[in-house]
Amino acid sequence: MARSGKVAVIGAGFYGSTTALRLAEYDIFETVVLTDVLEGKPEGLALDINQSRWIEGFETMVVGQTTGPNGEGYEAIAGSETVVITAGLPRKPGMSRMDLIETNAKIMRQVAENVKKFAPDAVVINVANPLDEMTALAQIVTDFPHHRVIGQAGMLDTARFTHFVAEDLDVPVSAVTTLTLGSHGDTMVPVASVCTVNGKPLGEMVSQERIDALVERTRNGGAEIVGLLKTGSAYYAPSAAAARMARAVHEDSGAVMPVCAWVQGEYGLSGAYLGVEAEIGRTGIRRIVETPLTDDEKALLVTAYEAVKAKQADVKDL
Ligand code: APR
């Protein structure tokens, strides 16, 4: 496939730089732009990634750009089809994602204003935490249609769940299908009814007690890594998820992925960013796919919706 288009990653920390690397290694984009407020950091990382092109065999060029407090440098993202926002502080041990809200909201406002100005037609994929709230804020500040502002969380939670099940049963990850919906946090909804191992229902392979333990580990999947790293949060699996979403936009693939999207009547829920399955394409969310849920799962999704809706109600004042 010929390389085309430009994708931008805002924030050249661990999450952003790994996302830029993955996007570049796909070798499907003409350009990957990587920005940060720390002078020289995005330029240095871009140079480093570009120097790996010969070894890894990709032609995509990464362009690093330092940005200033008044939007200086943002012209580099002009024409981007997708902007992945990773700018923001990560957690430290003992912190919840909500502890980041005020600091990251200030960063998000500044970033989103410039995305609106310099890449008005882009699809925005937010990954900054707290995820649901920062995604809602990105939409408010850009004033982009809701389908063009998406959050990354469900792909990651689902990937974590899949890994834990595969490891527990000692089977390849490719033999496992799982799904999580809801929020990226306490009200995450594991959809056990669609989970399978080699096509067999997970419930027939593992006791309910064991499933509950795997779900709990998934729910705390981010905190477990923060606790081990002590100085930051996860980025390999998160960047894999964000990069796949940007790829689905670029290829207009219609891939169905669990993402944080604006619900408008699906499951009887509306007016909030919630973890649901959706078809991703050039326009961002093409449509939300209503996964058949058991009554219990539906009740958990409603609980998650109520929690995220309440938290998103005050986001505009941040
Ligand atoms: N514009 C651009 N970049 C910014 C801005 C801003 N206004 N403010 C901060 N940054 C940059 C920092 O300079 C830093 O390089 O964001 C980067 C954050 O990088 P890390 O501290 O390494 O954090 P990371 O692990 O990448 O996480 C980023 O993703 O998972 C979430 O909770 C996490 O919100 C956090 C985000």
Image (cartoon, helix red, strand yellow):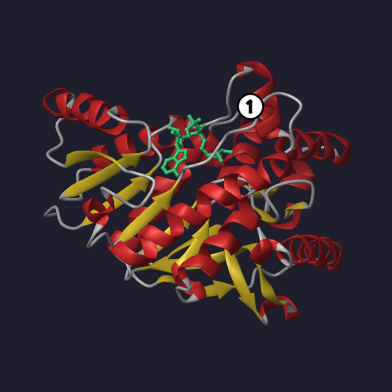
- Seen at 20% across and 39% down, the residue is 62
Q: Would the CB of label 1 be found within 8 Å of ligand 1?
A: no
Q: Position of residue 236 (x, y in %)?
A: 47, 31
Left or right: where 161 falls relative to 73: right
Q: Residue furthest front?
A: 70
Quarter occupied by residue 261: bottom right
Q: Nearer the viewer, residue 47 or 318?
A: 318
Q: Is residue 254 above or below residue 207?
A: below
Total residue callouts: 1
Quick one: quadrant of the N terminus? bottom left
Amino acid at pointer 1 = Glu
- Seen at 68% across and 49% down, the residue is 184
Q: Position of residue 169 (x, y in %)?
A: 68, 29
Q: Which residue is mark 1?
A: 167
Q: Position of residue 234 (x, y in %)?
A: 55, 30
Identify the secondary structure beneath mark 1: helix
